[in-house]
Amino acid sequence: MKFNATTRNMYGTSASRRLRHKGRVPAVIYGKNTSSINIELDHNEIYHVLLKEKYHAAICQMELDGNTKIENVLIRSAQWHVYKPQVLHVDFQRVNTQQELHIKIPLRFLNAEDSPAVKISGANISHIITELSITCFPKDLPQFIEIDLSHIPIKGSIHLSDIKLPEGLKYNGDDSNPLLALAIT
């Protein structure tokens, strides 16, 4: 995904409010060993990007000030208006393709309705964790991790050790074998 950004030199609440009235979104790019850059984005462009799940754990290319130099960035956080469909602020992190990333990847649970716990005993499958904290190189970064629930037994559970992480990913959470899903009767 590629989008355009413009550097901004006005800061503060009033300046951000004026940008939003013009259909722009204040944002910042930060990274290790580099200074942060305050930028502005087109609201409609970034709004539609943020609505798609696949861009929340993907490396995006940002063209800054119309230059041919492209910045590789990750969307780290986005602030939304409380009740309007409006993006208020976005934080980006620069990505070096030669260094490992520490990022949270969403989990996608599949085939729960085919599991013996649901078919035989009518259990509900509770998703205990919805994202995993992982370390990987940018080239190995997945959009999500799929977890097949079709084999979860009655009163059973699925832990991290029960699934195979994609190639190049290392789990770096506090618990060495966290509980991911649980069949509750």
Image (cartoon, grey):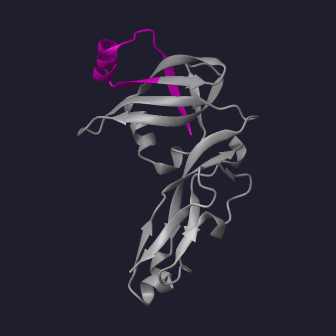
Of all residues, the one furthest to the right in this rendering is 98
In magenta, the rendered stretch is 1-27
- Residue at x-position 41% and y-position 88%: 121
Image x and y of residue 78, in percent: 42, 35
Say if the magenta span includes residue 152. Answer: no
Report if residue 148 is visible in the image: no
In the rendered image, the vertical position of residue 30 relative to residue 52, given as above or below: above
- Residue at x-position 47% and y-position 71%: 182
Q: In this view, does 108 lie to the left or right of 15?
A: right
Say if the magenta span includes residue 26. Answer: yes
- Residue at x-position 51% and y-position 36%: 76
* Figure quadrant of the C terminus: bottom left
In the rendered image, the vertical position of residue 115 relative to residue 64, given as above or below: below
Image x and y of residue 176, in percent: 64, 57
Image x and y of residue 81, in percent: 28, 35
- Residue at x-position 56% and y-position 71%: 158
